[in-house]
Amino acid sequence: MAEHREFFYRRLHSLLGVIPIGVFLIQHLVVNHFAVYGEESFNQAASFMHDLPFRLALEILVIYLPILFHAILGVYIVFVGKSNTNHYGYFRNWMYLMQRITGIITFVFIAWHVWETRVQIGLGNVELDYNLMENILSNPVMFWFYIIGVISTTFHFANGLWSFLVSWGFTQSPKSQKYATYATLIVFLALSYVGVRALIQFAYGV
């Protein structure tokens, strides 16, 4: 019974990493990318998302609870899972290890990002606008922290997407898994560009 329950939790963990968390990640990066087109464009996009009907309920049910479950179970998997990189130098073993490392980095990054943005906005200390991220990223230490955090998050999502396709039976043959590797690499590079480009805009206005 315990094995069946753990199997279910791990499947759910994989699913939530793609839907809804992965979908939210893409949406969040796209909204941030509006900063590239100017302060007004970003403020309009951010305001549109902030003013959505039932926003708080949607955030709790579709974003925060799934992320919390995914993060808690992910940390558990990190500490109970074993990597074979010391014995086998296979590419996927290294991806397994990187998935665990980026999972921890992403967990810390998201927690800090939520504290600096959503929590502070809720407390009335800051407003949701271009200046919020501009002020945060004006600190070089925070800029590089965000660069590492965004790249870690996009890698974790893209590599997790590959695992999702395998574990849910979409890619069973070696050939399909190879194609999935190329596809998820493109996803990683594309999302990383979108995220990092926005950070550079906020920090340096270029």
Image (cartoon, rainbow, N blue to C red):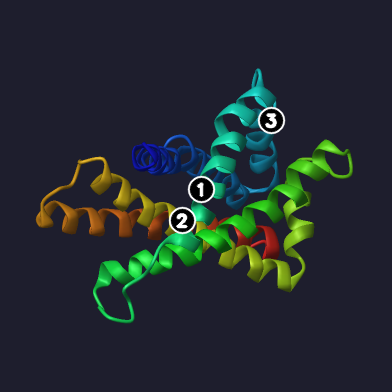
- Amino acid type at mark 1: Leu
Query: x, y percentage for residue 157?
Result: 43, 52
Query: x, y percentage for residue 186?
Result: 32, 57
Sequence-wise, which precedes: disc 3 or disc 1? 3
Answer left or right for 143 relative to 71: right
Answer left or right for 172 relative to 32: left
- Residue position for label 2: 77
- Amino acid type at mark 2: Ile
Query: x, y percentage for residue 176?
Result: 14, 51
Query: x, y percentage for residue 54?
Result: 66, 19
Element assignment for label 3: helix
Label 2 environment density (alpha carbons within 10 Å; few <14, some 14–19, many ≥20): few
Element assignment for label 2: helix
Q: Residue furthest front?
A: 1
Whole-angstrom CA distance, mark 3 to mark 1, is 29 Å
Q: Which residue is at 47% across, 35% downward?
A: 20
Q: Residue furthest bottom?
A: 86
Q: Which residue is at 69% across, 26% downward?
A: 56
Whole-angstrom CA distance, mark 2 to mark 1, is 6 Å
Element assignment for label 1: helix
Label 3 environment density (alpha carbons within 10 Å; few <14, some 14–19, many ≥20): few
Q: Are marks 2 and 3 in contact (CB under 8 Å)?
A: no
Answer left or right for 19 relative to 133: left
Whether residue 156 appears in this view of the structure is yes
Q: Is residue 129 above or below residue 61?
A: below
Image quarter where the N terminus lies is top left
- Residue position for label 1: 73
Sequence-wise, which precedes: disc 2 or disc 3? 3
